[in-house]
Structure formats: structure tokens, C-alpha cells
Image (cartoon, grey):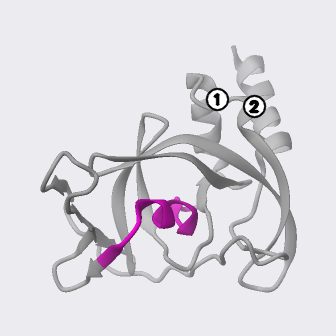
Amino acid sequence: MRRIAYCLLLVVILFLGACTGCSKSGKYGKASNVSNEERPQSHDAKKTSNSISERTTIYMVKEQGVYKIPVLINGSKMEFILDTGAGLISISNVEASFMLKQGTLTRDDVLGQADFYDANGDVSVGTIIRLKQVSIGGRDIYDVEASVVDNSVAPLLLGQSALEKFGKFSVDYSNNTLTFE
């Protein structure tokens, strides 16, 4: 069993490693820095209607200087940092490995590689994958590009590849809410 887990991790590292920077072509966004602040207690999503054409409000949690929201990725619950400066959704190799084990991510979902710039200006090659479904507050979008970070403790970032598909949104920092129109 240990050997199988090691082989799976090796496959993830070899085929799904990436950095959360902006690509050389400018298609993918930049990574954001995280500062330290106190952790809030909880968060929920509130839907004002079942229809995607109606307003949906998601409550955010401010944690270490960033805002986090609950997101379902291919049916798996995860907590993402709202990062309007990132071009792609970004997940770590741990989440990618979990989704591979669950069968919610396959080799067919690997789209290719791209060059990414990190915040220091360093360039690294990263893997781009397709997420079949991304759900926020009962709203679903499909076939969303994401990058996989070759780092087990990398934060989960909700970037432009998802936000642009949800359409118009607003952030109310005084009430810690993200609202999709």
C-alpha cells in the first residue's frame, strides 16, 4: 500500500507540478502574497435564489490577511482564497493527488504546460489541468482551467479562470461577502 501511495505521489509530481505565477504569454495571472492576521471562526454560503441568473451571496472568512470562500471542485469541498489577481485557479499537488485517488481528475484532464513567473520574477514550467466542475454558493461552471502547484502546502487560489465564468461579481469587505449578480 505504501508503495502504491509513493507511486501515485510521484505521478502527481511528474505530471501535475506547477507554480502559481503569471505566464510568459500573459494568459495566466500572478501569485499573491499572504500576511498574518487572526483567523475568523466560520463562514457560509447564502443563495438568494436557485437560478444562476439571480443574486448569490457567499460569506467570506478573513484569515491571515486574505479572504477565503467555500468551493466545490469536481465534487470535493475545499476552501479557496479569493484572488482576483491570479489568472487561474491554483491547487496544490495534495489536492490533485486526492482528486486522482477519487477518480475526479484523470490524465485526460491534463491540458499541457505553460511557463509561469512567480512574485520574484523566476520562471518555472507548470501543468495546466481542466476542472470539470466548480461550484460556489450553488452556482456551477464547467471546464475551468487550473494550475497545479508542486508544493503540498501551497494555498488554494480562486483566480480569473473561474471568476470570469461566473460573470459580474462584487466584494463587500465591510460585510465579508462576495456577491454574484
Q: Quadrant of the C terminus?
A: bottom left
The three-letter amino acid code for the residue at tag 1 is: Leu
Left or right: 29, with 138 as reference point: right
Query: Between marks 2 and 1, how big is the CA–CA gap?
Result: 11 Å
Q: Could you say which is closer to the camera, residue 23 or residue 19? A: 23
Query: Is residue 146 placed above or below 105 in the rendered structure?
Result: below
Q: Which is more foreground, mark 2 or mark 1?
A: 2
Q: Where does residue 135 sit, x and y in percent of width and height?
A: 38, 46
Answer whether residue 64 is visible to the viewer in this image: yes
Q: Could you say which is closer to the camera, residue 41 or residue 28? A: 28
Secondary structure at numbered mark 1: helix
Q: Going 12% across and 56% down the picture, which residue do you hit?
A: 48
Answer whether residue 153 is visible to the viewer in this image: no
Query: Is residue 170 placed above or below 61 in the rendered structure?
Result: below
- Identify the residue under disc 1: 100
Left or right: 98, with 73 as reference point: right
Q: Where does residue 20 sit, x and y in percent of width and height?
A: 68, 67
Left or right: 100, with 55 as reference point: right
Secondary structure at numbered mark 2: helix
- Identify the residue under disc 2: 108
Left or right: 97, with 51 as reference point: right
Q: Residues within 10 Å of mark 1 (few under 14, many from 20)?
A: some
Magenta-tinted stretch: 155-170
Q: Quadrant of residue 115?
A: bottom right
Q: Quadrant of residue 1?
A: top right
Query: Is residue 113 placed above or below 97 in the rendered structure?
Result: below
What is the number of the mark on residue 126? none
Residue farthest to the top?
A: 1
Q: Going 70% across and 46% down the picture, which residue do you hit?
A: 129
The three-letter amino acid code for the residue at tag 2 is: Asp
Q: Where does residue 150 sit, x and y in percent of width and height?
A: 74, 54
